[in-house]
Amino acid sequence: MAGIDNSNGVRVRNKANRNKANQNKGTSNIPVQELSEIERQIARGVAFPSRVEEKQETSGNISSETRPIHKTSKQVDVDSEFRVLVAGDVHGYWDESSEAAVRKLKPHFLLFVGDYGERHDTKVWEIARFCGEFEKEQHGMACATLGNGEAKMYAAQRTPSNALYVREQLQKLRPFNPSEKPRSCRGISVVGGRPFSWGGGGNGWYNKRVFQQFLNLSSLNEAKDAIRARINAAPPNEPIIFLAHAGPSGLGNYVAAPCGNDFHEYPRGYDAGDRDLRDGIEYARSIGRCVPLVVFGHFHEAMKRGDRRWRQLIAVDCGTVHVNAAVVPRIRRKQERNEQHFVDVRCSQDGEIVKTVKHIWISHDGRVGEQKCLYDVNRGGIIS
Ligand SMILES: [Fe+2]
């Protein structure tokens, strides 16, 4: 099946070639002498567009000089498309009106990035029930991973009751968890990152007892192997969407980066993305898999530690669109009605190309109160 290198519109006839084309993104038709040094590096595949100018501390608004380069001249067909709806970190904000909004929007895929409730509540049970209903009623696929919030109580206090609570949540979401095994629908696979992740602080392996106890993973290398195994288990030739709680490393060493550290435990601005997920994405590409989309949360849009700044929620890296969906709280009161936040991603029908990424606020009756387009492949990629 043909694919498109988004940056220059070249049609690529097989997946191995597409991978190569992604490595050469955006520069093949431009005379070498007209390229800047960083563009030459991108052309040679030794720098990623989103890592251009490993960015200085900036305000929440990313300047045009530091935004990832992702340009295209190719007009993508807008008539046929595939819809992915992402619910960011829930943190207790999921109710009947959230379910009504999803039913109105009728996505093909519904993705949850984790962090469902607070302490010992039953939000995971509600999410699991709705995932089952969604798959039955809408003939789509619902996937849900687990966040560090689901293991927070155990991390703080390793009691038998806290351990039981973590196990029950894992069990409840098992049918929908792409980190148990890859899920597939309509010729597109969803592969999960590492559940319960706190992000890659310190040596990249933070709160190790949780991963040992519940996932049987003793090291970052074992976590990398586990993701690679899931990639290998995904049906061949299907595009892969990655769903994780914490996003991958490699998206920037600055506080406002999609996975930039705004916590106090480690140096501010540290790239706190997960290295095992980064390894998985690059492994998938290396074996010729198409990776159009990576979805995650954990790094909330409103940054901590008094920054009063907003995080960059999108990045493009070698043609893969990375979306941080963590707008918290995801329900707000506006003009006397509740509005739900979702990230609305439209892909080409074959799932190989992300066409648009929008943040939408929607009420239970399907009325969209506000929307903001973050990415449009036909308008040059990331919208400033
Ligand atoms: Fe969260």
Image: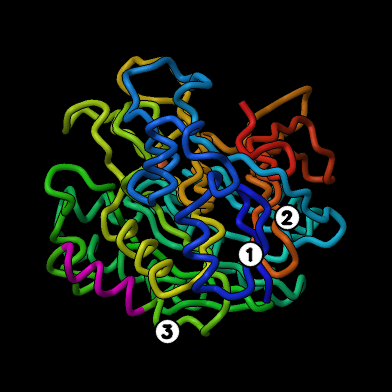
User: Vertical placement of 117 versus 270: above or below?
Assistant: below
Q: Which residue is mark 2?
A: 102
In this orientation, which residue lies closer to the viewer: 53 or 186? 53
Relative image position of residue 284 (x, y in whole percent): 41, 69
**Camera-nearest label, 1 or 3:** 1
> Label for residue 352?
1
Magenta includes 78? Answer: no
Q: Earlier in the sequence, mark 1 or mark 3?
A: 3
Q: Residues within 10 Å of mark 3 (few under 14, many from 20)?
A: few
Dot 3 falls on a residue whose secondary structure is: helix
**Mark 2 or mark 3, which is nearer the start of the sequence?**
2
Q: Earlier in the sequence, mark 2 or mark 1?
A: 2
Observer-nearest of 101 and 231: 231
Q: Is residue 251 above or below residue 18?
A: above
Q: Which residue is mark 3?
A: 233
Task: State the separation of the CA atoms marked 3 and 2.
Answer: 29 Å
Q: Is residue 343 above or below residue 379?
A: below
Instruction: From the viewer's side, name the closer residue of 292 and 181.
Output: 292
Q: Which residues make up the magenta segment? A: 220-229
Q: Residue 357: x, y in percent?
A: 66, 44
